[in-house]
Image (cartoon, rainbow, N blue to C red):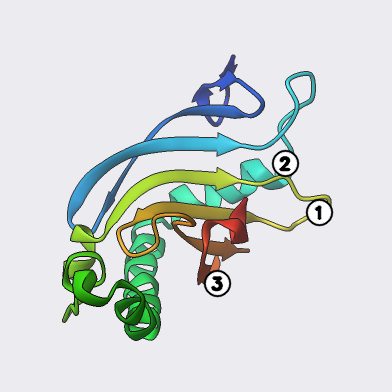
Amino acid sequence: MIHEVFGQIQYDYLWSKTFEIRIFGQKEVGVLNISGEEDEEIAQNQIDAFTEFELHKSRLIESTETALFDYYQSVIDEYRDRYGNAADEYAPYINDVEDMKSLLKFEAINLPYSFIDNQRVVGILFKAKWEVEHGVAVKIFNGKIVDVGFQEIVL
């Protein structure tokens, strides 16, 4: 289907398409996922969330980078303890936001369905070197970063 806001999207249990962002100084390719049913219209709050994200992408990506760095700094010691002798490989100490690019791989932008009008949610999901099982995500709610944690916060 060609959607007026999202462009060419395909349905396979959710609407999706390839999506590109620039984060940590490099271009990354992942997926844009839009929750919903094939026979229903995409919800207006999902359209609004994406439009708002695109409009403020530079600021939101910069804030996402900082939020991920701060989150990593808050959990690093716990993960280093878990990894023991392999800590420097999976959970190394880093000094600045730029160093995050070696630890994260952009995976997807998720636009979950919400039953509440005017609730705009965008999730940015990453594969994380230190958290292979759960990955990491940043949740943007009504244009502001509200949470960083396992990907489940935006699935």
Q: What secondary structure is found at the residue carrying circle 2?
A: helix
Q: Earlier in the sequence, mark 1 or mark 3?
A: 1
Q: Residue at x 37, y 70 (%)?
A: 68
Kind of residue sitting beneath label 3: Asp
Q: Are marks 2 and 3 in contact (CB under 8 Å)?
A: no
Distance between mark 1 and mark 3 Cα atoms:
20 Å
User: Can you give x and y, in whole percent of width and height, for residue 3 in the image?
Assistant: 59, 22
Question: Residue under circle 2?
Answer: 44
Residue 141 numbered mark, or none: none
Foreground disc of the pair 1, 3: 3
Displayed quadrant of residue 144: bottom right
Q: Earlier in the sequence, mark 1 or mark 2?
A: 2
Question: Residue under circle 3?
Answer: 147
Question: Residue under circle 1?
Answer: 117
Mark 2 Cα shell of 10 Å, populated few (<14), some (14-19), many (≥20): some
Q: Are marks 1 and 3 in contact (CB under 8 Å)?
A: no
Q: Are marks 1 and 2 in contact (CB under 8 Å)?
A: yes
Kind of residue sitting beneath label 1: Asp
- Taking the image as shown, residue 74 lies to the left or right of residue 100, namely right
Foreground disc of the pair 2, 3: 3
Q: What secondary structure is found at the residue carrying circle 3?
A: strand
Distance between mark 1 and mark 2 Cα atoms:
8 Å
Displayed quadrant of residue 113: top right
